Image: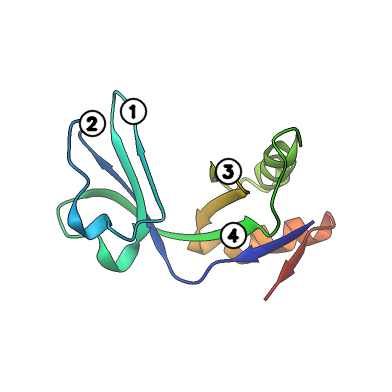
Amino acid sequence: MKLKWLSGKYSVCRLPPCSAVPGWAADAFSITRTGEELSIIASQDVVPDGVQAQHGFGCFRVNQPLKFDEVGIIASISQILATERIAILSISTYDTDYFLVSNDSQKQAQSALQIQGYEFIA
């Protein structure tokens, strides 16, 4: 399976659940609202000071559309990275899956996945 790193550094932000989506999040990577929070994943460069956030994530994706009945992709990737003690945040979209890992873990994550047969493309 082919994977691809996205360019840039990302932040995972938490706002109160009733918050309006702020203007700085207009080009956010992901916006998710639950009854407990508004989570925004955005380029680290656009997150203002004072926003509750964890910074310094890289992101890779499965570089192909996935069918809804395909199973085990997140489990497989997360198990490989868990064995290496690399924490992830996974996001599924209509087309594919994305994985955020700390910038400090990117090389280790890529190496572990390549050893298990995953290919990273440019």
Q: Which of 76 and 63 is in front in this view?
A: 63
Against 80, residue 109 (above or below) is below
Q: Distance between the residues labelled 1 and 2?
A: 6 Å
Q: Position of residue 43 (x, y in %)?
A: 36, 63
Kindly identify the residue that appears in the image at 68 percent across and 48 percent down.
84
Q: Mark 4 points at which residue?
A: 60
Asked if the residues shown at circle 3 and circle 4 are in contact, with their CB atoms under 8 angstroms apart, the answer is: no
- Circle nearer the N terminus (1, 4): 1
Q: Distance between the residues labelled 1 and 3?
A: 19 Å
- Circle nearer the N terminus (4, 2): 2
Which of discs 3 and 4 lies nearer the camera? The answer is 3
Q: Residue 34 carries which label?
A: 1
Q: How crowded is mark 2: few (under 14 residues within 10 Å), some or many (20 or more)?
A: some
Q: Nearer the viewer, residue 42 or 83?
A: 42
Asked if the residues shown at circle 1 and circle 2 are in contact, with their CB atoms under 8 angstroms apart, the answer is: yes
Against 70, residue 121 (above or below) is below
Q: Residues within 10 Å of mark 4 (few under 14, many from 20)?
A: some
Q: Mark 2 points at which residue?
A: 17
Q: Name the residue under label 3.
A: 94
Amino acid type assigned to the residue bearing label 3 in the image:
Tyr
Kindly identify the residue that appears in the image at 57 percent across and 51 percent down.
98
